[in-house]
Structure formats: C-alpha cells, structure tokens
Image (tube, grey):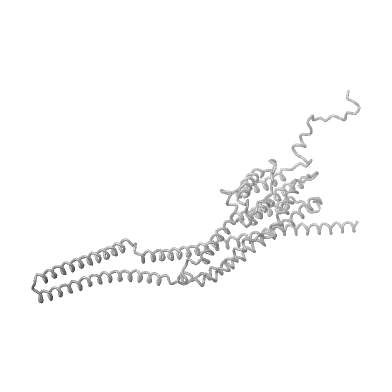
C-alpha cells in the first residue's frame, strides 16, 4: 500500500522522454525543422570560412571585411527566416520583442563607433597623401627643403594613429553586457517561436563575438574580447567554438601590452613613416641631396689634386739633384784650370766625392718618396682618398635608403586606403541591414497595435 502522503506515481520512472526530446513542450514539424536546419547549416559554413589559415590573419583588414560579410549574410538570413516562418509580430511574446529591440540598438551603437574609428583613420590618409606629394620630385630624389616641409605632416599622422578612440572604450562595456544577457529563451506552446529564438541566439552570439574582435583589434587591447561557449546541441556550435578558441588565444597574445590599433596594414605604413621621419630629421644627408653628382665630381678633383702634388714634389727633387750636379761640375772645371798642384787635385777629389754622395742621397730620398706615393695610390690608403671615399659611399647609401622608404610607404599607404574604404563601406551596409530589420519590427508593431484598437472599438 502506498502511504497517504505519497503522490501519484509517474508511468515513466525517469521522467517523460518526450519532454527530453522536445523540451518546452513544442513539437517541430518537418517544415520547421527543415528551416532551422538550413539556417544553422548556413551559419556553420560561414564560421568555417572565417577560420583563418594563420590566426594572425585576424589582424588584417581583409579578414575583417570577410567577417562583416558574414554578419550581413547572417542578419539577412534572419529576416528571410522570419518571413518563411509566417509568424506575425502580433504573435510575438513581449519578451521576444524587448530582447530584439535592446540588442539591435546596442549593436547599432557599436556599428557607429566602428564607423567613426575607420573614418578617423581614413582622414589620416590625407596627411599621408600630402607627405608623398611633397616628397615627389622629377629627379626622383627629394631635396632637403622638401624633407623639412614633409616632416611636420608625417609627425602629425603618427600622433593621430597613436590615439585610442574613446568610443571604442565604451564599446567594451556594451559588448560585455550583451554577452552577459545571452541566453536561449524558453518558449512554451509555440514551435515557430522556438525556431525564432534559436535563430536569434545564434545570430546574436556570432555578432557579439565578431564585434568584440573588431573592437579589440582597432583599440589594441584584448579587454573587449568576450568569452562564449556554445552548447553542443546547436548545429553550428563546433564551428563557433573552434573559431573562438583560435582567435581569442592569438589576439590575447598579440594585443597584450599594446595601446594602439594592431591592424597589419596600418603597422606597415607606421613602420615606413617612422623610418622616413628619422631620415628627414637627421643631418646625415647633404644639405642638398640633389647635388650628388657635384659631390662626386668634387671628390675626383681632390684626388687628382693630391696626385699632381705628389708628382710635382718628385719632379722638384730630381731637378734639385740635377742642379747640384751641374754646380759640382763647374766647380771642378774651374779648380782644374786654376790649380795644377797636388793640393788642387786633392780638393777636386774631395768635392767630387761630396757631390756624388749628396746626389746619391737626394736620389734615394726622392725615389723612396715617389715609391711610397705610388703604393698609397694603388692601395687606396692615402689620407685624401681615405676621407673622401667613405663620404661618397654614405651619401649614396642614404639616397637609396630614402628612395626605398618613400616607395614602400607609397605602396603601403595605398593598400591601407583601399582596405579602409572597403571595410567602411561594408560596416555601413551592415548598419543598414540591422536598422532596416529594427524599423520593420517597429512598423509591424504599430500596425498590430492599430489593428487591435480598431477591433476593440468595433466590438
């Protein structure tokens, strides 16, 4: 016998298995199940496409464009699903409406902040274009005056990209609120409502995560990244969790200790700008770098002058030796004519020997000096050449480095400009998709309210 306080026993000892199979008490028809499966399969495919070959590719504008395209497709599919469900707004629960409206308005704020930051970086392109315009020259080599004029604009651009946008800081708080409110609404007695809530949960989860990646990359901080883990019961959970794990780990590593944007295209331009700023502000270049041919010509004249001077010294030494020899010969002939004595002969021999020694000494010294000068010219070790050659090499290397730096910055700036333009356009398109869906819901709510009031008056 059962006790008086025992309730009625359940037919199933472990609970109703139908409730486990269809939680919420709403059974999905084949049509609804097909719509939900199609939606979730498309979402999983988009997420797999977003997973980069290298996790660091997330820091590029090209990956960000692909991610915005994914969000636009996702929210467009939501609108299509609502139409296919044939679920009028009048049948929506008030909680569903509140969730959608609150989430959409916060998402619009995030889009505005992202567009503002992209616009700020795009305005910096004007400074870069002005710098490149100033450094342009028909001869290919900018003058010192051109470098001085370009230096302030270059410094202003570097200061611009080094500032963190305040709006992005506010987005971090908004994203954390959205991630904290993420949940799958329990729906009773509405199979269509259940499909809608599952679809909205997927769209909101992916949107919040991708937007957090954008804000983290553009602000240079890992703080905006949200931590999400999607349950396995969703068909797109595996693709999402794999993408989340790969991206979060990479960004946390790359952005730790940073304070500015980590976009690779922007960093390439910044590296060129810093190097160009150093070259423009140092005194290693000549006062007029365009006069390099004159400097080379002057170098040749210095070397030639040194060589002529050395040859002149040698010729002068030989001439001195010849003059000394002739003087000795005259002295000897005069002495021979005047004196025939033995004493005169002895003086003659003494003078002759003295002259010969002096001539030999002068010739040896002259030959040694001439030989040393020739060896120095051949080995390139003369004082004049040692001073001139490094100067010519330094100017040439500085010229090549400056031209390469300008060329690299021009290419990088063009790639950054195109990337920012394309990404800004896509963010604007996504903003319009979200705004259109929100307006459509509000419009249907107004129509539903008006219809209800007319029905009440008629009754």
**Tally of numbered discs:** 0
Rendered residue at 29%/69% (across/down): 310
Front position in the image: 384 or 147:
384
Question: Quadrant of residue 25 in the image?
Answer: top right
Q: Residue 105: give x, y in percent of width and height.
A: 75, 57
Residue at image position (63%, 49%) is 252
Give the image quarter of residue 327.
bottom left
- In the picture, the quarter occupied by the C terminus is bottom right
Kindly give the residue lying farthest to the top in the view shown.
1
Up-down relation of residue 177 to residue 137 (above or below): above
* Residue farthest along the left direction in this orientation: 340
User: Which residue is more in the foreground, 190 or 359?
Assistant: 359
- Residue 101 x/y as whole percent: 77, 55
Q: Nearer the viewer, residue 445 or 71?
A: 71
The residue located at (22%, 65%) in the rendering is 361
x and y, in percent, of residue 90 in the image: 81, 53
Tell me residue 181's x, y (percent).
Answer: 75, 49
The quadrant in which the N terminus is found is top right
In the displayed structure, 7 sits above or below 116; it is above
* Closest to the observer, 25 or 377: 377
Q: In the image, is 428 to the left or to the right of 88?
A: left
């Amino acid at each position: 016998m059962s006790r008086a306080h025992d309730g009625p026993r359940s037919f199933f000892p472990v609970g109703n298995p139908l409730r486990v199979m269809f939680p919420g008490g709403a059974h999905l028809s084949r049509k609804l199940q097909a719509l939900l499966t199609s939606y979730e399969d498309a979402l999983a495919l988009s997420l797999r496409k977003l997973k980069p070959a290298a996790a660091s590719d997330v820091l590029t504008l090209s990956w960000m464009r692909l991610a915005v395209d994914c969000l636009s497709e996702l929210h467009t599919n939501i609108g299509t699903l609502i139409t296919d469900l044939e679920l009028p707004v009048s049948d929506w629960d008030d909680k569903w409406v509140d969730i959608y409206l609150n989430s959409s308005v916060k998402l619009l704020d995030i889009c505005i902040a992202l567009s503002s930051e992209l616009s700020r970086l795009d305005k910096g392109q004007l400074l870069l274009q002005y710098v490149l315009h100033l450094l342009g020259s028909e001869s290919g080599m900018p003058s010192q005056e051109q470098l001085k004029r370009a230096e302030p604009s270059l410094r202003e651009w570097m200061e611009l990209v080094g500032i963190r946008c305040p709006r992005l800081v506010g987005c971090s708080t908004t994203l954390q609120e959205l991630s904290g409110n993420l949940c799958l609404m329990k729906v009773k007695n509405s199979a269509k409502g259940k499909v809608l809530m599952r679809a909205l949960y997927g769209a909101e989860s992916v949107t919040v995560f991708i937007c957090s990646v954008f804000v983290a990359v553009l602000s240079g901080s890992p703080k905006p990244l949200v931590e999400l883990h999607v349950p396995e019961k969703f068909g797109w959970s595996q693709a999402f969790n794999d993408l989340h794990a790969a991206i979060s780990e990479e960004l946390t590593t790359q952005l730790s200790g940073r304070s500015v944007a980590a976009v690779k295209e922007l960093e390439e331009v910044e590296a060129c700008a810093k190097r160009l700023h150093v070259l423009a502000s140092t005194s290693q270049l000549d006062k007029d770098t365009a006069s390099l041919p004159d400097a080379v010509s002057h170098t040749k004249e210095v070397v030639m002058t040194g060589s002529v001077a050395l040859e002149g010294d040698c010729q002068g030494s030989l001439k001195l030796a010849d003059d000394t020899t002739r003087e000795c010969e005259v002295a000897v002939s005069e002495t021979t004519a005047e004196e025939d004595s033995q004493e005169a002969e002895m003086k003659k021999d003494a003078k002759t020997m003295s002259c010969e020694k002096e001539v030999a000494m002068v010739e040896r010294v002259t030959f040694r000096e001439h030989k040393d000068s020739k060896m120095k010219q051949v080995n390139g070790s003369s004082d004049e050449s040692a001073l001139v050659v490094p100067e010519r090499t330094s100017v040439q290397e500085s010229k090549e480095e400056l031209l390469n730096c300008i060329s690299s910055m021009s290419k990088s700036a063009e790639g950054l400009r195109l990337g920012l333009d394309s990404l800004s356009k896509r963010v604007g398109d996504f903003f319009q998709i979200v705004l259109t869906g929100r307006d459509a819901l509000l419009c249907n709510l107004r129509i539903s309210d008006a219809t209800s009031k007319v029905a009440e008056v008629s009754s």
